[in-house]
């Protein structure tokens, strides 16, 4: 094939520009180097293919625009919601390991029955240790209650995508809260929940833009119900796992 003209090395289609219009691969592909390998990793996380910083900036500065753009079909410019949630979860787990964070604080759930007390404590510990996996429950409770309270606005699938973004933000708050709990005090762990509630209400108002007071009130109710149901379901799953394990 005549290489005097620009062709894609992947699909061999005529290429004009930095990326192939047929398969999307970069046209400036040469021999594999260490620089290219790590550049691909950087691009995946933060740059062209997955603009991390743009997504974070809008999630806190103008979440409504990000959500409307993404649901409206402008997907390329933002980090995908599930991938963003998973990335934040990995960051949370990595930091928790690096600072050797103890989520249990050496506490025990006290009830009259000693065996039941041990089961409840083990279930609590299992829930805290596996919070990254159980957070998927929060995604679905949040998406479900958003659909319940704002059922005429969007489909459940769309609210689920929104819930993944919000759950990623919640994971970011949990990560910051670890530093406060470990290095300052563990007396204000509830502050993280309040901050997330305020953010959620602000983000929902930014998202819908109309009837702001009503949206704010409904958003507060959505967050409370979603978090309560998430806590109940996550603890129930953890308790059943521990209980069945001991049979």
Image (spheres, rainbow, N blue to C red):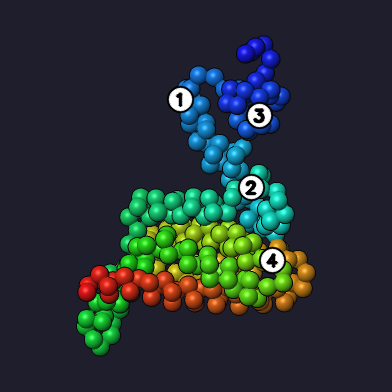
The answer to whether 146 is drawn above or below residue 112 in the figure is above
- Left-right relation of 49 to 125: right
Where is 227 relative to 69, above or below? below
Q: Do tag 1 and tag 2 residues touch (Cβ < 8 Å)?
A: no
Q: Residue furthest bottom?
A: 112
Q: Earlier in the sequence, mark 1 or mark 2?
A: 1
Mark 1 to mark 3 CA distance (whole Å) = 23 Å
Q: Please state the horizontal and vertical placement of residue 91, each as a whole percent of the image.
A: 45, 50
| Mark 3 vs 2: CB contact within 8 A | no
Q: Earlier in the sequence, mark 4 or mark 2?
A: 2
Q: Residue at x 23, y 86 (%)?
A: 113
User: Which residue position holds label 3?
Assistant: 20
Q: Is residue 54 above or below residue 19?
A: below
Quarter of the image with the N terminus in it: top right
Left of 6 or right of it: where is 234?
A: left
Mark nearest the camera among 4 and 2 is 4
Q: Earlier in the sequence, mark 4 or mark 3?
A: 3
Q: Nearer the viewer, residue 191 or 136?
A: 136
Disc 1 or disc 3, which is closer to the eye? 3
What label sits on residue 154 in the rendered view?
A: 4
The residue pinned by badge 1 equals 34
Picture quadrant where residue 147 is located:
bottom right
């Amino acid at each position: 094939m005549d290489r005097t003209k620009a062709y894609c090395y992947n699909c061999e289609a005529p290429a004009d520009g930095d990326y192939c219009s047929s398969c999307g691969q970069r046209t400036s592909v040469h021999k594999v180097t260490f620089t290219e390998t790590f550049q691909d990793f950087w691009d995946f996380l933060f740059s062209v293919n997955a603009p991390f910083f743009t997504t974070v900036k809008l999630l806190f500065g103008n979440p409504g625009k990000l959500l409307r753009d993404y649901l409206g079909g402008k997907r390329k410019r933002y980090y995908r919601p599930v991938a963003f949630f998973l990335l934040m979860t990995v960051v949370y787990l990595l930091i928790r390991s690096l600072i050797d964070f103890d989520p249990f604080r050496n506490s025990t759930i006290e009830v009259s029955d000693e065996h039941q007390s041990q089961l409840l404590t083990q279930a609590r510990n299992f829930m805290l240790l596996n919070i990254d996996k159980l957070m998927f429950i929060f995604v679905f409770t949040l998406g479900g209650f958003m659909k319940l309270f704002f059922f005429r606005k969007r489909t459940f699938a769309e609210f689920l995508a929104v819930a993944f973004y919000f759950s990623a933000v919640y994971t970011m708050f949990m990560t910051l809260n670890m530093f406060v709990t470990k290095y300052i005090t563990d007396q204000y762990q509830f502050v993280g929940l309040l901050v997330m509630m305020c953010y959620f209400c602000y983000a929902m108002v930014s998202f819908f833009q109309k009837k702001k007071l009503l949206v704010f009130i409904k958003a507060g109710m959505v967050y409370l119900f979603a978090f309560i149901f998430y806590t109940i379901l996550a603890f129930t799953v953890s308790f059943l796992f521990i209980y069945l394990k001991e049979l």
